[in-house]
Structures are given as structure tokens and as C-alpha cells.
Amino acid sequence: MIKRKLNSRFGFFLLLTLLLWVKNLFAYFVDFDLRLDNALQVFILLINPIATTMLFLSIFLFIRRTKAAYITGYLIYLLLSLLLFANVVYYQEFTDFLTIDTILGAGKVASGLGESAIRLFKPHDVLYFLDCIVVLAVLLLKKIPLDIRPVRAKFAFSVTIASLLFLSGNIILAETSRPGLLTRTFSRDYLVKYLGINAYTVYDGVKTYQVSQIRAQASPNDMEVLAEKLKQQPKEKNPETFGIAKDKNIIYVHLESAHQFLIDYKLKDENGVEHEVMPFVNSLYHSNSSFSFDNFYHQVSAGKTSDAETLLENSLFGLNQGSLFSQLGGKNTFNAAPSILDQKLGYTTAAFHGNAGSFWNRNETYKKFGYQHFFDASYYKLNDANSFQYGLHDKPFFQQSVKYLEHLQQPFYAKFLAVSNHYPFSELPEAENGFPKVNTGDSTIDGYFATANYTDTAIKEFFDYLKASGLYENSMIVLYGDHYGISDSRIEDTKELFGKEDWTTFDTIQAQKVPMIIHIPGQEKGEINHTYGGQVDVLPTLLNMIGYDSDNLMLLGHDMLSPNKEELVAFRNGNFVTKDYSYHKGDVYDNQTGDLLNFSRPEVLEEAKELKIKVDEQLAASDQINNGDLLRFYYDSDLSPVKTEQFNYKNSVKTLNGIEKQLGDQSTSVFSKNGQRSTEELYKTKSFKEYANETDK
Ligand code: GP9
Ligand code: MN
């Protein structure tokens, strides 16, 4: 019976589908590291190769001529096997999936799949094409006789339709499990995990095509026009702060999902006792060594963290849809902070993050930004107890970062992406629980203050280390909130926490303020600055503070310390805030009172309409630069395009040690300055429970 079925063309179709399905599952569980968090994800993973495999293979069912049908069927099966195999080999080297760009860029593939791939070739890799050989042999030896009866067109058609329906079901399930999967494109891992290699590749192909079309139409003239416009904007420097942090290390501390309202907030527990949520960050915020901002807004869209990174390090916006990192990060030319600091001021540049490097396509984008080193999850010891779905928790993250940080030559530019204070705000390690939860009825809000408190302690411990190791005095430390933690749809539930009876649109706009603290040890001129600004303004501010004249760069933001900073903060959706009022979809609200001004002060509404044009222009300029990859035509910055081949993020330890050796006495790393000894032991960390026990005693 089975044999008879197998002897039919449809039987052959089923056999090939089955083989490909099994091979895909094998790759999922043996070669790829796709973190599975729940049963639904496992289920989706199990079924996701089926629909697309059937869809592609169904093509041969339409072919009437016997040999042609079998050859086509076999070739499709071979191609799909090859695609899978190529991804497996690529993944073994890069912990990421092949993009169409990588496949087309033959040189890059060769460098990627060269020697090291052969070295990494695992014996079990044979299994990915062993079946192809067997099937071919069976066909050639006529063990499976070719079925001369063509498949009825109607039947072939229904197989195609069934596969399409199956695919739609798969996509719906995927979107349920991970909303925004196709629009936000978090990482290739996610697409493969939810839709499989085939669908991911097609998706990537379509995106790549769209990008290449827009890019092909862009011209150097577009760049010139924009550059000319930008030059006309006044960019006065502040002599008081220009160069104030010259030659200092720059340390970014990313405050995940931190609203400005966390600053100075004291949470009342059920007994009415107040608990300061971020005591350490508050102390920095109020220190006269800090330039702190209390009217600073995030400007991200769907790319969330990655948008914040784009804004901060390029002074350009993220995209209107999806994440720039995912879509253009590996393709575009950037004049990003790491590249500027490396090329112009000789900084060492490194990013630290305890999540997989493929998330938000960081492993490619960071290279394009000019990061020499990227310490991703593979550099850290993660286990179930110290990590969650977004990676390593903050305390072990900062602690484990030290053994890499101490090898960076100074001055360095180092970015630390903390992540514990991330939605769903409920996954702290056991010993870290204890900070009071609130009771809004929304579980995601209830844990938010506790996770923020945990991050605060982690940062304090990191600062203690910076002080103990001597790095502190030589550094400027920038703490910034990347975006809201509590989304617009939930934020209203916080009203009681802030003693509000009603929650208005204006309150939601206010909630988009995030912390921005530039801490420069030794400085005494610091204060809380009320200038209205946003993430796009950070790079111009920072460059002026380290004394680098950025007039020749295409930066869309403005130095927030400049005496003539225009206080206009654009949101990615076209709304904006000025120092006097907030504009939201045609309405204007007074920043002091929150009152709607549309009718009481129509002249304000008129002015807002003028400014709205400016805001749209700023966003359009950013999109034009990003989508058209216009910085490839921009020469005034005097920066060379980053040669990404020079970076190998798997080799950083070796590279850094090599540099230390080569420099000998001249080495400025903390490790060298500490007499070639590690400073790891200077790092002190304790759990919430341990701290609590100490104070009890
Ligand atoms: C993951 C982290 C979270 O690596 O950056 O990103 P988000 O979800 O906040 O954009
Ligand atoms: Mn984030």
C-alpha cells in the first residue's frame, strides 16, 4: 500500500516533503539555537517547515511530462536542502542566518564560509544531503518507478491552495505568539523560529529587493540638497561646556524601558512605607557632576531599543516602519559615534549586551556603526537562573563585563545595554525579589518598579567597580532611557500611583520623557537642565562635550547645551513637543497646565501647524538619508566608510590581548595599568536579599 502510494507522483511529493520536514527539525534542535519559551512556540516550530515546503514542491505537480516533473521535483527538493544546509554551516560560524545580500555578495560568502567553515564542518552535517543522494540513487536505479500519469491540474491546484492556507495559519499563530513579527522584524532568529527557513528567505528577498529599488533611485544630488539645508541651521556651541569631557572614556549605560517618572519616584507599599525606586540613579541625577535633563523624550518607533541606538549614535531617526537595524543596519553607510570616535580621536569602541548578537541584527549593524568589539551573550555565562528571554540579568551582566572592559585601550567608547527592566517586568532571579510590587491589576505594571530597582542596584555596583578600578575619574558616563516601559495602552492604569484621578492624552505624552544624565566625575557645573530635547540630540551634545567639532557631520539633532538650541522634539509619528506645548494629532496642549489650547488660543494652533511642517521635514530628511543610503555620497565628514571585514566579533579577547602585548608599557587598558592583573575581584555584587539582610542587622 505504502509502496503503491510512494510510486505515485503525489507519493513522491509526500516523501520529499517529509524528508525536508525532518531535516529542518533536525537543524532546529541540533544546529540552531532558537530559544523556545513556551509550548506554543514549540508547536509553531514543529509545523513551520511544512507549508512552504509543500508550496514549493507543489510546482512539480503541475508538470505533465513525466521526466520533467520528477526532475523539477527533485531539483526543488535539492535547492531547499541546499538552502537549509548553507544556513546550518553559516550559523555554525556566525550564529545567524543567511541573508539574500550575503548569498548574492559572493566575496562575503567566501570569507564567511571559507576556511573556518571547513574547520567547523561537523560530521553530522552529512545528514543534510545524505537523503538527497539516496533519493537520486533510488530514482536512477528505478527503485521508485516513475509514475507516468500526470497529476490532475485540479488536484495540484488544491495542494497549492492547501499549502497557502497552512502558511496563513502558521503566520496567524506566529503573530499571536509574537505580535509585530513581520512589521518589526526583531531578528532573523525570530523569523526562522516562527516561519521557517524558506519563508524567512523569501521574506528577506522581498525586503532586500524593496530596499535596493529605493537605493538605486537615490543620487549624490539628494545628499547635497539635504546637506545644504542642514548647514543653514544655527549650531552655536556653548563655550562653557565645549570640550568639558575631552579625552575621557565614554560609557553609555542603557536604562531599559525607563520612564523619566521613575526618577525621584517613591513607591508606597501596602503599609504606606515609601521605597525609592532608583536611589542610585537619583543621586547621579541630582549630582552637580551631572548634566541631567528633565524634558528629554524618547523618539523611537517599532524598532524600540534599536531605534534608540540609531538615534543616539547617528543623530538620525529610526524608520517609520520596522527597525532600521534589521532592515538597513547591515547595508547602509553610517557616520555613527563609534566610527567617528575611532577614526577621528583614536577611541577603542565596544558594545556589551547579554542577549544574542543577532537580536535587532546588532551583529551586522554594529560593524557598520564602526564598533570594533561586540560582547554579546556568547561572551557571558548564562543559565536559567540568571537570565530571561532577553538575555542575562543586569547584575551578572555588568559583573561579567569587567573581564572584557578591563582590556580596552583608553580612551574607549563603551556601550552597556542593560535589559532586566524589560517587559514583562516579572522575571527577576529568585534572590532579587523583595522590592514591593504595586497593585494596579495589570501584572506588567505591577512588577515594573521592582525590576527598575534591580537595575538601579546593578548600576550602583558597576559604578562602585568603576571607582575601585580607577576608571571612574577618566570617564564620562551617559545614562539614558531608551523608550517607555509601560505602553500607551496600559499607561492609564498608573494614574493612582501618581495621585491622578483622570488620565489624559497630555499625560501620555508626558510619559514619553525618559532619563538623560551625563555624569562627568570631577565636574561641578552640572545641573538639571530644563531644555526640551530628544534622543536625536544626544550625539551633537556629546561630541561638543568631548570637544569635537561636528559641524561637518550630517546630524539632525542639536546640542542640548547650546544657547540657541531650538526646543522642538519630533516624535516618529509626526507629533511633537516644544518648550511651551505638545502637539498630538492636530491638538495642542499647554505644557504647564495640560489644557487643550485649540480653541482658547487659536494662534498657538496656527504656530503649531507651521512647526508641524518643520517636524515632517526633519523626519523626511532622516528617511531620505536612511532609505536612500545617502551617507555613501557624503564626503564632508571626512570619514572613511567602515571596512566591516576588519572586525571579527568572535575574536575580541584575542585581539585585545594582542594589542596589550604589542603596546607593552604603552598599553592604557585597566588590566595593564593594574600590573597585568585582572580587576575582576574589585567587583562586588550582592542579591536584593543579601542587601536586605545587611540592613536588618
Ligand atoms: C534585546 C533588547 C530589547 O536585545 O534590546 O529590545 P526592545 O524589545 O526593548 O526593543
Ligand atoms: Mn528597549
Image (cartoon, helix red, strand yellow):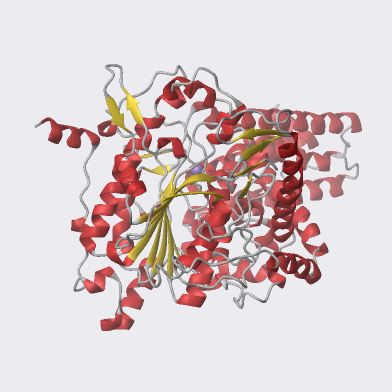
Q: State the residue at coordinates (31%, 37%).
A: 385
Q: Residue, x 77% and y 59% (percent of image)? A: 212
Residue that lies at the very extreme toward the left in this rendered image: 697
Answer whether residue 138 is visible to the viewer in this image.
Answer: no
In the foreground, 149 or 30: 30
- Image quarter where the C terminus lies is top left
Residue 584 visible within the image: yes
- Residue in front for this viewpoint, 488 or 663: 488
587 over 622 or under it: above or below: above
Q: Residue at x 70, y 54 (%)?
A: 618
**Residue 7 picture quarter:** top right
Quadrant including the N terminus? top right
Residue 71 at x, y = what percent?
80, 50
Numbered marks: total: 0
Q: Position of residue 265 (x, y in %)?
A: 37, 33
Q: Nearer the viewer, residue 511 or 135?
A: 511
Q: Position of residue 598 (x, y in %)?
A: 72, 31
Q: 543 or 98: which is nearer to us?
A: 543
Q: Is residue 213 left or right of residue 303?
A: right
Residue 603, image quadrant: top right
In the drawing, does residue 397 fall left or right of residue 134?
left
Q: Position of residue 633 (x, y in %)?
A: 72, 72
Q: Quadrant of residue 559?
A: bottom right
